[in-house]
Image (cartoon, rainbow, N blue to C red):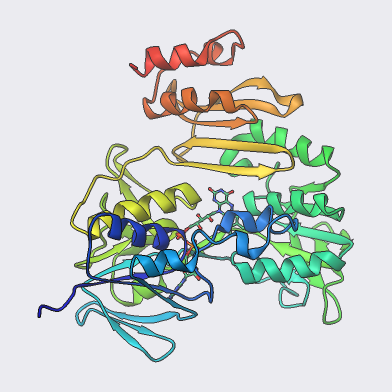
Amino acid sequence: MARRPVSVLLGAGVAGHFAADALRQAGFDGQVLLIGAEPVRPYDRPSLSKGFLQGQKEADALFFRPEAFYRERDIELLLGRRAVALDVAARRVALDSGESVRYDKLLIATGAGPIRPRLPGFDLSGVHVLRSLADATALREDLAAAERVVIVGAGFIGCEVAASARALGRAVTLVDLLTAPMGHVLGDELAAVYAELHRAHGVDLRMGRRVVELRGQGRVEEAVLDDGTRLVCDVVVVGVGVRPEAGLAADAGLAVDRGILVDEHGATSALDVYAAGDVAYWWHPTLGRRLMVEHFDHAGMQGAAVGRAMAGQPESYAPVPSFWTDQYDTTLQYYGYPIGWDQVVLRGEPSAFAVSAFYLVGGRVVAAAMLNRPKEHRAARRLVAARAAVEPAVLADPDTDLRALAKQLAGE
Ligand SMILES: Cc1cc2nc3c(=O)[nH]c(=O)nc-3n(C[C@H](O)[C@H](O)[C@H](O)COP(=O)(O)OP(=O)(O)OC[C@H]3O[C@@H](n4cnc5c(N)ncnc54)[C@H](O)[C@@H]3O)c2cc1C
């Protein structure tokens, strides 16, 4: 009897889960092994900084699927095992359990890990990063007894944790060198709206400042800023970005530059080895450049596309990337390519925290972000997909029917 082909998926996160499901949906009837370092099956990571941290959702509610889902599809879960070495010539992956797994096709979907800055006092107890369910559980326990929280980094994770900690009634100080929260992605105009939003909810914003030291006797007691300010605290959350978990691939000789280089089908430089999600630095065929996207929708969609490619059904993966963030009673939906802009046009009511931002390059819409403006999502997405040329005044005009405009300019 012929040996069953083996597809090994490294990383039981978002991309790994959707790849496994897509392999089976595409009719792959070989062995599927989903291997993950975390001891739990794939779950909804975005909820960690939102509903889970606020105690509105428990861990059981986070899992994408029950165990039976994997059993019924003959997807073998090898959890609590970390891949420690990859040999592409022998087509083998070594695990920290001592096991060695042979593959015919391999997906690396190991995600990204939080950057742990060289900050004096970072190792004190009460100092947290947030990436995994274990991280979130530890932070939630600490927050329960905390009074004052300092958050280092006003990116998406830092801002969501700030909102959750405020919902729990904790005093929150948010510190970043940026001039306003998430300004590096959202631009000054929309970031200024978020600064007001956080202030309105009682967050003490310390923008343009850096935490230079954490101090305490065993447990963190204060954060020291670069201007000498000492912030008393009992919990610190450090959210200063992530780094792709690409070491395994680099050590195995795969082409890596920031993330693992992959083409539009998710194929790496090594035969029959693919990568997807936060770890992949992928070629966008219609943009004609590489993108590093560290967001949920992309990880799921690219994981699924690569799963189909591994099953022999390659397709060109070229979506308009998108993400969302939930803070307090707001939702922001973003579509587009995080590659810079030369003009930002706001539309709506910034003071009511209901505003859309359109990002233009050479008069063309390359990205759009809608804060509490759900009715504009579809039209904005079309404008971005078509890279539509629109007069800024027309975009900003509240009387402009965005749907009609998108129909006309996107040719639909
Ligand atoms: C707290 C939080 C909130 C977020 N909120 C949002 C949001 O609101 N909107 C949004 O768009 N995105 C959000 N994201 C980002 C989103 O969750 C990620 O982009 C997505 O999880 C990436 O999926 P992935 O499969 O590439 O990686 P992951 O989901 O991180 O999965 C990778 C898995 O691989 C495992 N692994 C790593 N190395 C190895 C190894 N050597 N061997 C075996 N396993 C390994 C890891 O332990 C992990 O379980 C959030 C992320 C976090 C942490």
Is residue 319 visible to the viewer in this orientation of the structure?
A: yes
- The quarter of the picture where the C terminus appears is top left
What is the x, y in percent for residue 342?
50, 29
Determine the image quadrant of residue 105: bottom left
Q: Residue at x 76, y 25 (%)?
A: 351
* 290 left or right, relative to 118: left
The number of discs equals 0
Q: Is residue 197 above or below residue 243?
A: above
Q: Is residue 225 above or below residue 188?
A: below
Name of the residue lying farthest toward the bottom: 98
What is the x, y in percent for residue 309?
23, 55
What is the x, y in percent for residue 191?
67, 37
Q: Is residue 376 above or below residue 275?
A: above
What is the x, y in percent for residue 154?
69, 50
Name of the residue lying farthest toward the top: 399
Q: In the depicted view, which residue is nearer to us: 361 or 14?
A: 14
Q: In the depicted view, which residue is nearer to us: 300 or 29?
A: 29
Q: In the depicted view, which residue is nearer to us: 228 or 262?
A: 262
- The quarter of the picture where the N terminus appears is bottom left
Is residue 390 visible to the viewer in this orientation of the structure?
A: no
* 172 left or right, relative to 7: right
* 205 left or right, relative to 373: right
Q: Residue at x 30, y 49 (%)?
A: 283
Q: Residue at x 31, y 51 (%)?
A: 305
Q: Residue at x 77, y 65 (%)?
A: 236
